[in-house]
Amino acid sequence: MSKLTAQDSTEHETVITTKDADSGLTAIIAIHNTQLGPAVGGCRMFPYAQEAHALRDALRLSRGMTYKSALAGLPFGGGKSVILGDPRREKTPALLRAMGAFVDMLAGRYIIAEDSGTSPDDMRVVAETTRHVTGINAQKREDPSPATAHGVFLGIIAGIRQVFGTECLAGRSVAIQGLGHVGYHLAKNLTNAGAKVYGSDINVDNLRRAKDDLGLTAVSPDEILCQPCDVLAPCAMGAVLDESSIAKLQTQIIAGAANNQLATTEDDERLRARNIVYCPDFAINAGGIIDIHHQQHNACSDTRAAALEHIGHNVANILERAQDRAVGTQQIAIAMAEEQLRASSQTNPHDSKQLLCSPGVSR
C-alpha cells in the first residue's frame, strides 16, 4: 500500500486510506473536525487520475462539511470519503462491503452517506459491514436529493431578491450544470416556478430525461458555464469557478449544489470584482444533510420544512453581510461557520491530528 501525504492535512483530525486487493477498493476517509459531533459526510466515487487528486478532494470536501453542518445548526462534524474508480464499471457489492468495513474501523467517528457516484441503495450494502451509515431509511427509502435541491431553490430565491429586489422567478433564466439527482429536482422546481431553464450533463441519459420530463433547453457541457442567464447553478463536480471561467461568465448570480465550486480562495474576490453574487456552496446545499438528520429523529414534515427554510435565511444573511462589508460571500460564510464552532460548548474528543494509512480492510 502506498502512503499518501498532504501538506494541508494538518488541520484535519484524521486522514486514512486503504487498498483492498480482493474487492478492488482504494479509498480515503478524511475527518476534518468533530467539535460539534461525529463527522458526517457522503462517499464520492470517481475515476480520479491520481491518488493525490482524490486526497485533495477528500480534504476539501470534509472541510466543507464542517462548515455546512455548523451553519445549519446540526450536531455533526465534517468528514468525507472518496473511492477511486468508475462507479458505472467498477462498483460492486464486494467493494461496497469492503468500504463499510473500512468505515467501521473508525468506530463511529465518521458516519458515511451517499454522494456523487453512490446511492441510498449502495449505502444499504455498505451497512452490511458497518452500522455507521445514514440516509438509508429502510421503511421510507427516502432520497435526500430533493431536499438538497429545495435548499438550493430557496438560496436562488435569496439571490434573486438580493440582485433584483423580488422573489419572483417567473421569466428568470437559470443554467444548470449537471442534471443528476439534485440537478434534475432543482430544474423541476425552477420550471414549476416559471423560470426558463437551460441544462447540460455529460451523461446523455440524464440530459434526455430532463428534456423529456421538463422541457428544458439543452446546452453543451462546454458552453453551460458561459450561457447568458440570470442564475448559474453548478450541480456537478467542484472547482469549476476559476480565474479563466469567471472571466467568461454571463450571469449575475451563482447558486448551485456542487461542493467546492471555487477552485481557489482568490476566486471569491474575483466574483465580487465582477459584481456576481455568489451563494456559497456549503450554505446553499445543506438540505440533504438537514433532511438526513430529521429522518434519523423521525421529525414531522413541518419541522423538517422549517429547518430547510433556514437555508434561505442563512444565504440572505450571508449576502447582506458581504454587501455591507464589501467582501466576498465565501469569506463571510466561513466566518459565520467558525463563529458557530467557537460558540459550541462541546470539546473535541479527538484532538490528535493524524495522517494514517490503514493496514487494509480485512476480508
Image (cartoon, helix red, strand yellow):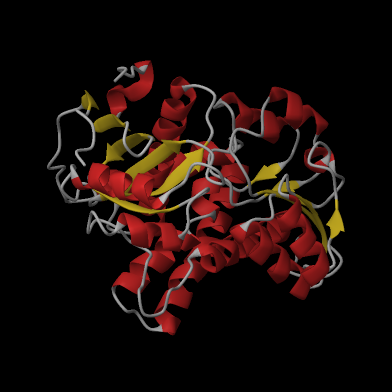
Q: Residue at image x 78%, y 71%?
A: 213
Quarter of the picture holding the C terminus: top left
| Total numbered circles | 0
Q: Quadrant of the N terminus?
A: top left
Q: Is residue 251 left or right of residue 135?
A: right
Vertical order, 199 against 10 (above or below): below
Of residues 216 and 85, which is closer to you in this image?
Answer: 85
- Is 202 on the left-hand or right-hand side of 126? right
| Above or below for 64 versus 11 | below
Q: Residue visible at 55% across and 43% down?
A: 89
312 or 45, which lies in front? 45
> Which residue lies at the image location 29% right of the left edge and 38% below the top edge?
31
- The image quarter in which residue 142 lies: bottom left
> Where is residue 315 drawn, in percent x and y?
55, 55
> Is residue 193 shown to the viewer in this render?
no
Residue 228's spot in the image, x, y percent? Answer: 87, 45
In the image, taking residue 138 as reference, residue 61 lies left or right, namely right
Residue at far front of view: 22
The image position of residue 59, as x and y in percent, is: 39, 31
Residue 124 at least partly seen: yes
Residue 43 percent across, percent down from the top left: 41, 47
